[in-house]
Image: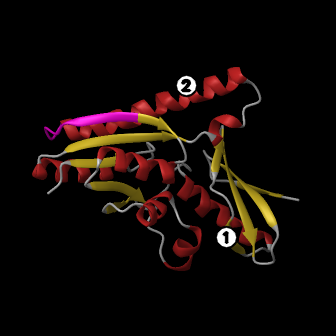
Amino acid sequence: MYERILVPTDGSDGFDRVAAEAAGIADMADATVHALYVIDPRAVDYEPSPEARETVESELRETGEEATAAVAAMARGRGVDVEEVVRVGTPHSEIPTYADEIEADLIAMGTRGRTGLDRLLLGSVAERVVRMSDRPVVTVNLGDGEREIADEEAAVDAAAALRADGHELREVREDPYRESSTWVVPVVTEDGEQFNVHVNAATGETRTARVG
């Protein structure tokens, strides 16, 4: 049935639901869980000096180790074998690549549960992995309760506040990326204007900057 289950994590709130689901499946199938955290290089490259980039990458690697350790603890609590991995790359492409490398039988991911046009238009890491990977993907709804802006999908949701400024959001033109305590979401409006929406990761407050 399943021998290797890949669990990509970003350490966001509610992810224990995904870890529990994956651990349960692995326990029944006698499979190994592979906990993966991907460091997005865009979160590092914006730093002006090599020393600062090294510091940020080190901090993100520590965050990744903590996130994969949390998944591992959940799995080991069910008697499941676990591999913990931290890699650098664009999450939505690195996840399928790693899945292919380990010949994963299943990928378990969290989603914020958007529906309708916003879901189709804006996308998420989970949705992109579903489209890009040839391997089965199971998604677990992390819910929409109060939370910090901990991932790309939540940042895109917050960027929808651009509508309140008199603009209708048409699409996200590039993947969101994080700069220290702020998410940057590059968007295009219905009238063709380009903005960067800056989202405070702690509060969800937004501000917009016109591009060009």
Residue for badge 1: 171
| Magenta-highlighted residues | 77-85
Mark 2 crowdedness (10 Å alpha carbons): few <14, some 14-19, many ≥20: few
Q: Position of residue 138 (x, y in %)?
A: 31, 62
Q: Residue at x 53, y 50 (%)?
A: 151
Q: Quick check: can you spot residue 8?
A: no
- What mark, if any, has residue 58 been given in the picture? 2
Amino acid type for the residue under numbered disc 1: Glu
**Residue 32, picture quadrant:** top left
- What mark, if any, has residue 179 been given in the picture? none
Amino acid type for the residue under numbered disc 2: Ser
Q: Quadrant of the C terminus?
A: bottom right
Q: Secondary structure at mark 2?
A: helix
In the displayed structure image, the side of residue 33 where residue 134 appears, left or right: right
**What separation in Å lies between label 2 and label 1 (alpha carbons)?**
33 Å
Q: Secondary structure at mark 1?
A: strand
